[in-house]
Amino acid sequence: MDDFVIRIWHEGNPGNILPMYLSALKMKEILGFGKISHVDISMFGINLPDVDLSLLKGGFHDEYHSNGKRYGYVPFHGLRKHIRNSDADFLSLEGLCQNINNFPNRLHFDYDNHFPFSEKNTEGGGEGDLVINIRGGEILAGISPLYPMLPIEFYKFLEQKTGKNVIFCGQLDDSVYMAELKKAFPKATWRPSQGAALDFDFIRRSKHIVPCLSTFSWFAAWMSHATRIYFPVAGVLNPAQHFYGNMLPINDDRYEFYLFPIFDALSIENYREYLDPIKSMWFYISHKDLEKATENRSSNIDNYLLSMNIDDVIDVYSEYKNEYNNWGVKGVINMYLREGFFKNIRTLKIDRSFYTRKYPLAALDISNGNFENEFEHYVMKGQFQNYLRYNE
């Protein structure tokens, strides 16, 4: 199985590639085998050649839109079961994979070794500094609503709250917004971009960080050993706005969260049009309250894949039988990933009368509204307690 291929589909900047690559690393770790392909993150010396999947027998596809509808989550454990029980020789990761639950645990994975600090930089903000990352470049044209600037009032609040020396770093392109920012912070230090690798490293070496609304900035802060990260839950970093991801590090004590309303970017010349209405409407939110506010931004697809009985599925659903006849288990799983999960098809047969009679506590759970029916109870709970689905 060492020849099993885990391929990521996208090419681009490090902020886009990192979540896919980390998802591939976690998939390999959970599988216990495989080789990762089609990865180029030159600033970390990572270059893994592509593999032509058309030359392989066949495999599983975690497609862009279905991955997005699961908030970027990759169902590692469910996929592991079906990879091991099929003749698949690849997994193609085709979504953005922008979900924090996809990434190897920081407590167990050696990020500093796998993604080494740059030898060309030794600088970063110290304990007395507040490093604020600014993104300019192409987003100033308003190319995506997910990448707005943040209110200057937010930065002033953090300056006053922390009492630290402010350092602005990143793409500090001239603009009407930047002119106002410089006027508001006459004593700040300004560190223009020195290229992606050195910018990333400077943020990562800093102790108190305010990331901008970008995955690049997110990873630089997250991979750091910062004392405190002041996190704006906004734009691409707000799962209520960026529906294809959930990058909230809710279980990380380094983070202090500030929740913003939904607001879309416009071209930088019109920044006041979208920032003025919300410039004082953001607020601090606790980890617990943020978790509650975003609890519907998770996916339980793993449980459904783990519960899936292929024979039951192809017996009940003719379209899945056709996929099985053409592609075997691979066809069934790919169709389920693409549409079946979202259509709530049943992944197995279960005898309601038998199940509720044999397991009265399960019946009470269902009656109490904790589970919709016996199928959901089995998927979410019963399968892990070795419950029977019918009288054998």
Image: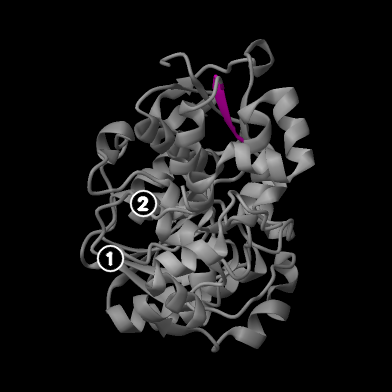
Q: Say whether residue 247 is visible.
A: no
Q: Which residue is drawn at 47% across and 21% down?
A: 47
Q: Nearer the viewer, residue 310 or 198?
A: 310
Amino acid under label 2? Asn
Q: How crowded is mark 1: few (under 14 residues within 10 Å), some or many (20 or more)?
A: some
Range of residues picked out in magenta: 88-94
- Return the disc, 1 or 2, that comes first in the chain's sequence: 1
Q: Say whether residue 262 is visible.
A: yes
Which residue is disc 1 drawn over? Answer: 254
Q: Determine the secondary structure under disc 1.
A: loop
Where residue 233 appears, x then y in whole percent?
Answer: 50, 71
Q: Is residue 67 left or right of residue 83?
A: right
Q: Is residue 360 magenta?
A: no
User: What's the CA distance linking mark 1 and mark 2?
Assistant: 39 Å
Q: Determine the secondary structure under disc 2.
A: loop
Image height check: is 223 above or below 358? above
Amino acid under label 1? Arg
Q: Which residue is drawn at 74% across and 32% down?
A: 323
Where residue 293 appears, x then y in whole percent?
Answer: 49, 78
Which mark is drawn over residue 208?
A: none
Image height check: is 271 above or below 209? below
Where residue 292 appears, x then y in whole percent?
Answer: 44, 78
The quarter of the picture where the N terminus appears is top left
Q: Nearer the viewer, residue 90 or 203?
A: 90
Q: Quadrant of residue 351?
A: bottom right
Which residue is disc 2 drawn over? Answer: 386
Q: In this view, does 243 lie to the left or right of 298?
A: right
Q: Residues within 10 Å of mark 2 (few under 14, many from 20)?
A: few
Where residue 189 appears, x then y in whole percent?
Answer: 38, 63
Find the residue positioned furthest to the top. Answer: 55
Q: Which residue is drawn at 59% across and 55% down?
A: 70
Q: Nearer the viewer, mark 1 or mark 2?
A: 2
